[in-house]
Image (spheres, grey):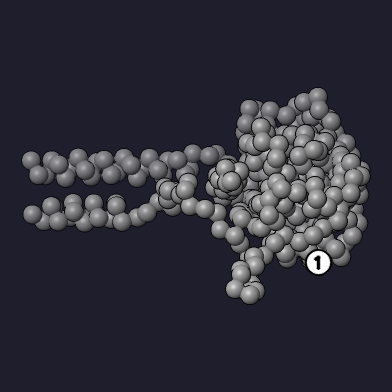
Amino acid sequence: MKNSIIYFLFIGATVLVSGNYACTISSPNKQGENLYLANCATCHGDNGEGLRNLYPPLADADYLKLHRSELSCIIKNGMTHPIVVNGKNFHMPMPAADKLNAVEIHNILNYICNSWDNEMEYFTPKEVESQLKKCQ
Amino acid sequence: MKYCFLFITALLFTFSCVDPDKVVYDENARLPILGERAFVNGDTVYHTAPDFNFINQDSINITPDLFANRPYIVDYFFTTCPTICPRVKAEEIRVFDHFEKNPTLGFLSVSIDAGKDKVYKLKDYADKLGVGTPRWHFVTGDEDHIYDIANDFFHIAQKDPDAPGGFDHDGRLILIDKNKNIRAFCDGTDPKAVDIFIKDVEKLLREK
């Protein structure tokens, strides 16, 4: 009897521990998420919601699909011109994140473009590198 | 017997940790008066918010008279701040919306970038956030004046070419009561701290 109680306790503990572990690795792009939170989230929000009419949303944002080929350079060099996102005008300048390398930008893009109702084809490292070579 | 001992040890471990999220907020304790105090002729003289002279986003001169006999919240920011300001503003909007039905509570956002944050920029910033007068004033003024009084507002503000955006400052929200005493503050970048701050403001508004 005692043994069976210990057995069940052991199984229970194993399930709990493995469950927690599964949660920590469930995000397919952990580095992208961490880099996003460190470099982008203060303005664009932890869930890509943006801030009213000041900072544009990234969640379910048409701009990402319409400007796919420019996204790497926007992250790298920032942006100063006005843009339209989901029908709304935004013109707050975006600072450059010039300390990020191509791999990091690649991971951030794949995180943004496949989170919060965005469903875009994954970026390949080559695609990001070739975009960065053509930055103006 | 051995398992019984193990079980008790496990129980002790479980209950020995106090979860900081579950610390109960004392609704009845009066908010303290913060800051240094002096004793003059047997009376206690409390720290008060400094006098100020600013221009708001509607080009109107703003002095403490605007907040005479009513509480207000103060923060230091600048419109092109790339680091903490957006988070603080998002949280401050939450406080603003929470007290929507309480027009006596004022908001004062002081720009520390007098060079760039002209009146029209402040106006544009407030409009884009969907907030503004008569409850929320985004102000600028004489640069030295802004830095000189920061300390008395419990704020840190200074130019620093090495800091992101060119300025060092903090993201605190400060609560000032109708007698100009500072009664509460919080880290405006931390949603949990702001939750408690909202309770502090509610408590102050209930004071007679």
Drawn side of residue A114 relative to residue B118, left or right: left
Drawn side of residue B110 relative to residue A122, left or right: right
The residue lying at 33 percent from left, 42 percent from top is: A16
The residue lying at 13 percent from left, 40 percent from top is: A4
Mark 1 is on which residue type? Asp
Where does label 1 land, which residue?
B148
Where's residue B71, x and y in %? 68, 48
Where's residue B37, x and y in %? 63, 69
Asked whether the viewer can see residue A76, the reply is: no
Helix or strand or loop: what does disc 1 sit on?
Answer: helix
Q: Which residue is nearer to you in this view: B125 or B74?
A: B74
Drawn side of residue A44 relative to residue A14, left or right: right
Instruction: Report the label total.
Output: 1
Q: Which residue is nearer to you in this view: A63 or B97?
A: B97
Furthest residue in direction top, as rendered: A87
Q: Is residue A44 above or below residue B77?
A: above
Q: Chain of mark 1?
A: B
Asked whether the viewer can see residue B18, the reply is: yes
Q: Is residue A85 above or below residue B171?
A: above
Where's residue A29, x and y in %? 58, 41
Q: Which residue is nearer to you in this view: A4 or B200?
A: B200
Where's residue A66, x and y in %? 79, 28
Drawn side of residue B202 relative to residue B154, left or right: left
Quarter that holds the N terminus of chain B: bottom left
